[in-house]
């Protein structure tokens, strides 16, 4: 896809004139600092938003509202999220229907990275704002639409840092394709399974494109690790029909790193929380939406261990006791 120059300005312009946009400002927002920076948002209008999301009986990406379209070519369109909570939240969608739970193609990966690179250039003067791409894939991933879409938001890193960047910085590694001897990186302090890989190039090569086949191998390496976690989990729990269960995962990407998180469920509810939380990719970089005022107060007062009670519950435990190496995907 030919990425528009000044994409950020184009997003702002389209947002300003989009008649179809239904923006909801969080009523309250607070950063909770733990091992992860959490940005907890309380949204009163969320139930309405949920309803309008579910009410759409037709595929909203088949003929997107023209006022939301930012750019379109033969294969893809960039459209604004109709129900954003973060300004300029937009989506890369395929023009023709492709299932959301199919694999990303090498072209999808390269286009996503090109968009992040272009936005990085556009935002050069505003160093604290970082574009983040994410892909919710599979029934337990938090996805609500069946038509393939990669989403993009802007994160204010002064307010809320993205921890996978620290993992990459600490490793001092540049881009590599993972294998048995060089597995993906992880944050040793996190209890949930996750796999991070750097996308940074050698100095002087930063502007060169990451070759499509390298991108494809990096992505497949992440998927293989997610499948192995699921397989080990099911074996450890004696789940006989595990071969039939579908892979669910979240994929998150910035210009400098890519991360996959295997998922076990899309919502969590337990007595301590007193409500149900829907968790998608953004939950794993600490961005959590809460519909209940009581739950919001409880969470921001630090009474709930979010890693244990939310992220671990909707993901998988890291370092499952391996049954055998031979069956690794
Ligand atoms: P997900 O729930 O991860 O599948 O993401 C779907 C995204 O599409 C959400 O951010 C929705 O708010 C957004 N969305 C839903 N309906 C529309 C629509 N008609 N036009 C544009 N975006 C939409």
Image (spheres, grey):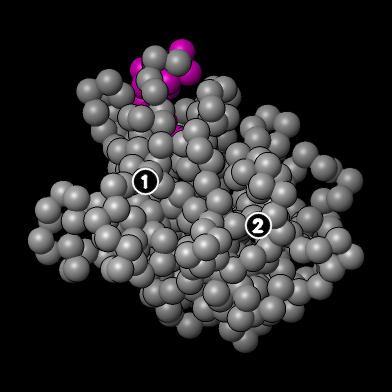
In which image quadrant can residue 235 be found?
Answer: bottom left
Q: Could you tell me which quadrant the N terminus lies in? A: bottom right
Asked if the stretch drawn in magenta spans residue 134, the answer is no
Q: Residues within 10 Å of mark 1 (few under 14, many from 20)?
A: few
On screen, 228 above or below 32? below
> What's the residue at 30%, 24% (across, down)?
273
Image spot of residue 301 (x, y percent): 46, 13
Q: Nearer the viewer, residue 141 or 61?
A: 141
Q: Which residue is mark 1?
A: 319
Q: Which residue is mark 2?
A: 198
Image spot of residue 144 (x, y percent): 37, 57
Q: Is residue 227 visible?
A: yes
In which image quadrant can residue 7 be found?
Answer: bottom right
User: Considering the numbered disc 1 on the image, is that residue within a helix, a strand or a loop?
Assistant: loop
Q: Select label 2 or label 1 by which is in front.
A: 1
> What's the residue at 71%, 73% (across, down)?
210
> What's the residue at 38%, 44% (across, down)?
318
């Amino acid at each position: 896809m030919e990425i528009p120059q000044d994409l950020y300005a184009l997003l702002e312009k389209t947002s300003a004139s989009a008649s179809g946009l239904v923006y909801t400002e969080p009523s309250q927002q607070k950063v909770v600092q733990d091992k992860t920076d959490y940005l907890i948002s309380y949204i009163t209008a969320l139930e309405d938003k949920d309803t309008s999301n579910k009410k759409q009986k037709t595929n909203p990406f088949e003929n997107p509202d023209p006022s939301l379209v930012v750019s379109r070519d033969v294969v893809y369109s960039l459209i604004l999220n109709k129900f954003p909570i973060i300004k300029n939240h937009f989506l890369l969608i395929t023009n023709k229907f492709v299932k959301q739970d199919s694999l990303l193609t090498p072209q999808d990966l390269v286009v996503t990275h090109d968009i992040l690179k272009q936005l990085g250039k556009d935002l050069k003067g505003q160093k604290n704002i970082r574009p983040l791409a994410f892909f919710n894939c599979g029934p337990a991933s938090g996805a609500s639409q069946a038509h393939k879409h990669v989403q993009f938001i802007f994160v204010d890193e002064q307010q809320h840092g993205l921890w996978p960047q620290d993992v990459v910085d600490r490793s001092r590694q540049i881009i590599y394709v993972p294998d048995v001897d060089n597995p993906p990186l992880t944050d040793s302090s996190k209890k949930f399974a996750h796999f991070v890989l750097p996308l940074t190039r050698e100095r002087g090569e930063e502007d060169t494109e990451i070759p499509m086949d390298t991108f494809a191998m990096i992505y497949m390496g992440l998927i293989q690790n997610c499948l192995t976690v699921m397989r080990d989990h099911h074996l450890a729990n004696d789940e006989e029909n595990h071969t039939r269960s579908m892979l669910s995962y979240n994929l998150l990407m910035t210009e400098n790193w890519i991360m996959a998180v295997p998922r076990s469920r899309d919502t969590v509810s337990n007595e301590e929380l007193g409500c149900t939380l829907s968790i998608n990719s953004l939950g794993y970089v600490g961005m959590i939406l809460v519909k209940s005022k009581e739950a919001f107060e409880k969470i921001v007062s630090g009474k709930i261990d979010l890693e244990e009670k939310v992220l671990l519950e909707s993901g998988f435990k890291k370092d499952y006791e391996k049954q055998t190496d031979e069956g690794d995907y």
